[in-house]
Image (cartoon, rainbow, N blue to C red):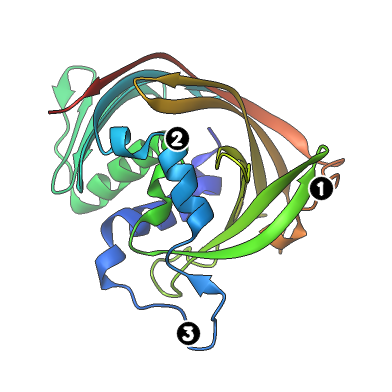
């Protein structure tokens, strides 16, 4: 995963999506192309196993540049229970967040968390969970979408969707996301995002090694990046990544999915 400094605004948005959605107003009047629901996103969520995901417990190992993390995700409709265990500064941390609780352990010792520390733990968990369970969060209450039509990547036409968040919903609400889906199936092919900071930048994650476990489609990710001020996802175009650097490869393994009754 990327450094904490570079992912702070991104995680803030993700947490806003998960926890602030019901408080947010729609985009400004006149933005007719921005909508809550898009058929291509609904299709993607279904194709990736949406109904299974919404009533399931998933256990897996996610490995990236910063190490390997054991993850358990339990989803029952609108209720979630997310647990992550992995390395932090040479030690081992285990953390759990639910709709209404934050818990963490350093080794076997429970951590006494202040409000600020609880938020940091939420950030740490979500930074490791959110992307591996895409596209399931793209219909959360505070997600707004825009269909940008078809775009050719590597000889194939992909359906391009821009995702934004309501201004003022978080300190990083100006960050933007793009998602590219295979039009026939709805399978997520790649996604990109901008992030603020010094110097700020862009990330493009390309999915590969798809496999379906317990009715849910999982994939690994090649993580490419370009750093610099003032960059937005609108700067991303097919064939325009000649100066980008490969940041990492994100893999998921040892996947087990159990359906909940």
Q: Which residue is mark 1?
A: 238
Q: What number is the disc on residue 48? A: 2
Q: Residue furthest front?
A: 184
Question: Looking at the image, which residue is at 29% across and 40% down?
Answer: 121
**Residue 32 picture quarter:** bottom right
Q: Is residue 54 left or right of residue 156?
A: left
Q: CA–CA distance between discs 1 and 3?
A: 30 Å
Q: Which residue is mark 3?
A: 28
Q: Position of residue 104 (x, y in %)?
A: 20, 32
The label nearer to you, 1 versus 2, is 2
Q: Position of residue 125 (x, y in %)?
A: 34, 37
Question: Looking at the image, which residue is at 16% across and 27% down?
Answer: 260
Is 18 situated above or below 37?
A: above
Is 253 situated above or below 55?
A: above
The crowd level at tag 1 (other Cα within 10 Å; few <14, some 14-19, many 20+) is few
Q: Is residue 22 left or right of residue 46?
A: left
């Amino acid at each position: 995963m990327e450094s904490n400094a570079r992912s702070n605004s991104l995680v803030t948005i993700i947490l806003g999506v998960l926890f602030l959605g019901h408080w947010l107003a729609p985009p400004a009047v006149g933005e007719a192309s921005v909508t809550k629901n898009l058929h291509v996103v609904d299709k993607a969520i279904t194709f990736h196993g949406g109904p299974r995901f919404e009533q399931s417990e998933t256990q897996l190992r996610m490995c990236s540049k910063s190490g390997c993390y054991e993850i358990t995700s339990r989803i029952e409709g609108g209720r979630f229970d997310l647990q992550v265990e992995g390395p932090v500064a040479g030690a081992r941390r285990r953390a759990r967040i639910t709709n209404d609780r934050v818990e963490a352990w350093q080794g076997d010792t429970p951590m006494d968390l202040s409000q600020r520390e609880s938020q940091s733990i939420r950030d740490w968990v979500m930074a490791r969970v959110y992307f591996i369970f895409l596209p399931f969060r793209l219909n959360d209450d505070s997600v707004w979408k825009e269909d940008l039509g078809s775009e050719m990547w590597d000889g194939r036409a992909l359906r391009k969707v821009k995702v934004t968040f309501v201004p003022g919903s978080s300190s990083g609400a100006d960050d933007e996301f793009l998602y590219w889906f295979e039009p026939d199936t709805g399978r997520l092919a790649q996604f990109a995002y901008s992030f603020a900071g010094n110097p700020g930048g862009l990330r493009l994650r390309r999915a590969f090694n798809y496999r379906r476990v317990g009715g849910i489609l999982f994939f690994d990710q090649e993580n490419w990046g370009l750093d610099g001020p003032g960059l937005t996802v609108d700067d991303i175009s097919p064939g325009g990544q000649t100066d980008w650097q490969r940041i990492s490869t994100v893999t998921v393994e040892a996947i087990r999915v159990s359906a909940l009754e």
